[in-house]
Amino acid sequence: QVQLVESGGGLVQAGGSLRLSCAASGRTISRNVLGWFRQAPGQEREFVSAISWSGSNKYYADSVKGRFTISRDNAKNTVYLQMNSLKPEDTAVYSCTAKKGAAVTTNTYEYNYWGQGTQVTVSS
């Protein structure tokens, strides 16, 4: 079993930056696909970004491409999401997730482990 704990959320003005971290415990996640999803009030959970186990392949939603960067440190069992040029529409609860197997997907239902989430609020 894998436990995921996010940190780094908060309140930031539009144009600002935040760096989210997600630490895994229970077992190593070095062979898992890792991802970030977000959910705004009244909306469905949506894909933000994902990274392959080696870190060589990264995927982003069109809405965050060029502004967000996903990375991972397998030695630290941690995945990061650097968020720059934040916009009010980025306001949401951000959750990290891990998936068994090597195939990267944007489908929320294919991910096996989830953190509790961290709130990101961007003021205009």
Image: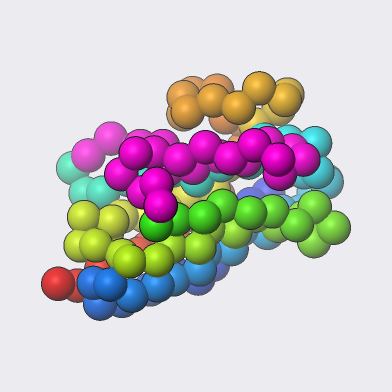
Quarter placement of the N terminus: top right
Which of these two is toward me, 7 or 85? Answer: 85
Magenta stretch contains residue 50 = yes
Overall secondary structure of the magenta section: loop
Can residue 114 be seen? no
List x then y, in percent, for residue 6.
Answer: 55, 60
Colour scheme employed for the rendering of this structure: rainbow
Number of disc labels: 0
User: For the point 60% across and 59% down, which residue is it?
Assistant: 80
Q: Is residue 55 left or right of residue 20?
A: right
Q: From what the image shows, is residue 99 above or below residue 27?
A: above
Q: Position of residue 95 (x, y in %)?
A: 48, 49
Does the magenta portion include 19? no
**Left or right: 115, with 89 as reference point:** right
Q: Nearer the viewer, residue 106 or 116?
A: 106
Examine the rendering and report whether any part of residue 49 can be seen.
yes
Query: Which quadrant, please, contains the C terminus?
Result: bottom left
Q: In the orientation shown, which residue stands out farthest toward the left?
A: 124
Give the residues in magenta. 43-66
Expressed as whole percent of the image width and height from the top left, the position of residue 18 reads 44, 71
Which residue lies at the image location 40% right of the left edge and 66% below the top edge? Answer: 84
Is 101 displayed left or right of 39 in the figure? right
